[in-house]
Image: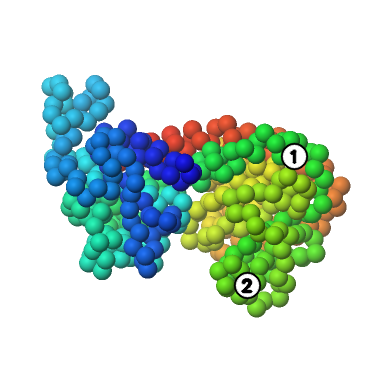
Amino acid sequence: MKPYQHINYILQSILNECLQTGVELCTFRGSPRYQSHNINICDEIWCDCCNRMAGNIELNKNLSSIYEYYDQNTKKWYDKPQEKNANPLKAPRVFPHAIEHSFEPVYYALDIEMWDPKYKKCHPWGNHLLYIHTEIKDNPVIVLHSEYNSKDITKLNKLGYKTVHWFSHAYLCSEYYFKLYDDLEIVKNYRARPIKHAWISANRLLRQHRTDFLEMLDLDQGCYSLLNPDPNGLTYDGPVPSFSFDDHTNSSAEICVTRLTPWNTSFLHVVSETVWQDKIHFTEKVFKPIVLHQPFVVLQAPDSLAYLRSYGFKTFGDWWDESYDTIEDPAERMQAIADIVNSIGAKSMEELETMRMEMASVLEHNFRHFYENIPAICLDELREGIANL
């Protein structure tokens, strides 16, 4: 069973557990996000509560009128009162559908035909699952997502969707992508790896903020990759030369650790996330330095470091100025991050070895926390978010 498929089963189980109703988990066929050119809303998840395959159009026609009573003793919902203190609701607590959108950013304007009910006639077959019972204002649709401080999520809330945030990529990377790395000696014994590069910045796909940032750096001090054109055919005509330290045969969710490479012999890891300014949406990129016992800086929206710390990770304010995380102006924040990277690049390898020794407790904490605690933290966050709907 593939990771996303397994996680979908876990999500369906948690939805049923927390809501005590039959909720149909809608996923996207062949992609973790909606594709307007290829109507791809579907599901293959078994719904234990309803004893049927989710995605079957022949749903229980009375689904919107069951589970109307909450029992204070058992803390569960029922189709009829269990005891005298079971409180009837004015409206049933039923969410016929949940959309699994945990691993890609939500872009309301780009996918407006999916999100906004008034556009549903554009693709009636594709939106059929979302509106099979009632309009979302009557029985809200749940959206499971992984972005923070997002105007797109605020827009969905205004439309009537009930949204649940959880740190999905942290769970995915700890339990699946990087699960087996923690037992490898070359990963665990990081002090034995020499530091050959002051910093590393991996950029497989072209993004404006990535090329802008590279233009601010003394490129001779560190190691970077910049494919031009990139795998999507995009091109860049700026001053940064095309270069790569990797053959890119590995997926973005893999790290080459079987031998010494720039991946594991660099000191500072520049985490250049997919989304730059308008929301916090961490992917697998931030967990590569954590697995490799490397300090990092993050190119993303303000409060990204605060977001990581809220999940128990430690950052590196004892060694450089992390106030960049609070700078709202994107140009000023990017320059502040570039100043850190250039200052690290100006140090000798011996100075960086000493600094790595000084921050060993932080590096080792992040490594252990990622493998030992993060999966439970993420699923508890998901359960709490669903239970509080």
Residue 186, label in figure? 1
Residue 241 percent coordinates (x, y): 73, 72
Which residue is at 77% across, 42% downward? 356
Amino acid type, residue under disc 2 in the picture: Pro
User: Is residue 167 found left or right of 26 in the rendered image?
Assistant: right
Q: Residues within 10 Å of mark 2 (few under 14, many from 20)?
A: some
Residue 191 percent coordinates (x, y): 79, 38
Between the C-alphas of marks 1 and 2, the distance is 33 Å
The one nearer the camera, 360 or 195, is 195
User: Is residue 150 found left or right of 43 in the rendered image?
Assistant: right
Q: Are marks 1 and 2 in contact (CB under 8 Å)?
A: no
Which residue is at 55% across, 69% downward? 232
Residue 127 in which image quadrant: bottom left
Residue 362 in view here: no
Amino acid type, residue under disc 1 in the picture: Ile
Residue underneath mark 2: 229
Sequence order check: which comes first, mark 1 or mark 2?
A: 1
Specify the quadrant that holds the C terminus.
Answer: top left
